[in-house]
Image (cartoon, rainbow, N blue to C red):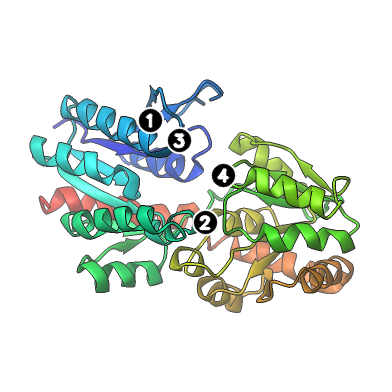
Amino acid sequence: MGKKKLIFSVTNDLVFDQRMQRICTSLQHAGYDVMLVGFSTKSSPPLSAQVFKQKRFRLFFSKGKLFYLEYNLRLFIWLLFQWADLMGAIDLDTIIPVYYASRIRKKKRVYDAHELFCEMKEVVSRPIIFRIWKWVERKYVPRFPIGYTVNAPLAEIFKNDYGVVYEVIRNVPVLVENSFSLEKEPFLLYQGAVNEGRNFETLIPAMQWVEMPLWICGDGNFMEQVKELVAKYNVQDKVIFKGKYLPENLRTITAKASLGFTLFENNGLSNYLSLANRFFDYLHAATPQICVDFPVYHQLNNIAPVAVLVDSNDPVVLAVIINKTLTDTSFYRKLQENCLIMREKWCWQQEEITLTRFYQKIFSIGA
């Protein structure tokens, strides 16, 4: 019997999607024939070499309603003519074409819920958009009885709301022995999507009272507003926009940073119950971080403090916490020591065991 073929669909250009690169690599090594599908734009960098197959659609539209319409239609038509044993929808924005293609072709399907899509600020704050996506969620998630998400609170919501029992597979980095440094350089770091709800409205004004510069490595739908905040508070000399880095280059920067930030506004369950990639990226780099005091982070930090938790949106308070963390040498070193301990436990080598068992079960029981 040949390899089982798995096709996963996302709405990004693949190059910066470390989460799906890890998942697809693990499944390819586990004996599956894996393909990851996304899209590209004129500014997309070349695909990085991977052990799994990759495909990107070139689209006429890059955002908005027409983007989703074009991408979903092209993805559906393409999937109809692909040979596959299983089709995976990654988050809600690919669930419709994957559902209908898998149903027509009579193939297995899996839903990978990286977040509560309808509870993201850019969705929940726009009533019409929210109602559309909520309708999609109510209609299609129950039609994916097999799936997984990134933490237990999200799994509980899917069970209570839609009657689906999803596995928990956390989004943590691969453990690499030389990926950390205890000796840091004098800069702060925000890495990841520069999107609404990341509390830049607190972080940027706080930089007025912090002498160390802040590097922002990423891009997103809130970039222009962040630049306006930088100008408003006159911190142009302290906030440096570095752009997007390839994952391997970003890891080097993260290991050099003195302090990282995992901040969210409490404006929807997606943020409140989040477990952001960057929380673990800083940890694996032995870089202490300032982190929002939301339930999942609170639970993890209680096991071994790797972050300073904050529950205030006051820029002055945040600035005080930043400066104190940087100057309290013994406390800072203790956070680093805990990072070194926990990176051995909170790593992809542990999570991929659950991932491979999940897919083995699907094919062994004929689900």
Residue 311 in which image quadrant: bottom right
Between residue 203 and residue 282, name the one nearer to us.
Answer: 203
Which residue has dot 1 on it? 52
Disc on res. 221: 4
CB atoms of marks 2 and 4 within 8 Å: no
Q: Count of labels shown?
A: 4
Q: CA distance from mark 2 to mark 4?
A: 29 Å
Which residue has dot 3 on it? 63
* Residue type at the position of mark 1: Phe
Q: CA distance from mark 4 to mark 3?
A: 10 Å
Q: Earlier in the sequence, mark 2 or mark 3?
A: 3
Q: Quadrant of the N terminus?
A: top left
Give the side of residue 248 with respect to residue 173, left or right: right
Q: Earlier in the sequence, mark 1 or mark 3?
A: 1
Q: Earlier in the sequence, mark 1 or mark 4?
A: 1
Query: Is residue 39 in view?
Result: yes
Give the side of residue 318 with respect to residue 16, left or right: right
Which residue has dot 2 on it? 347
Question: Callout 1: few (<14), some (14-19), or many (20+) C-alpha neighbours within 10 Å?
Answer: some
Q: Residue at x 66, y 56 (%)?
A: 282
- In terms of secondary structure, where does tag 4 sit? loop
Q: CA distance from mark 1 to mark 4?
A: 30 Å
Question: Callout 4: few (<14), some (14-19), or many (20+) C-alpha neighbours within 10 Å?
Answer: few
* Residue type at the position of mark 2: Cys
Q: CA distance from mark 1 to mark 2?
A: 21 Å
Give the side of residue 60 with respect to residue 42, left or right: left
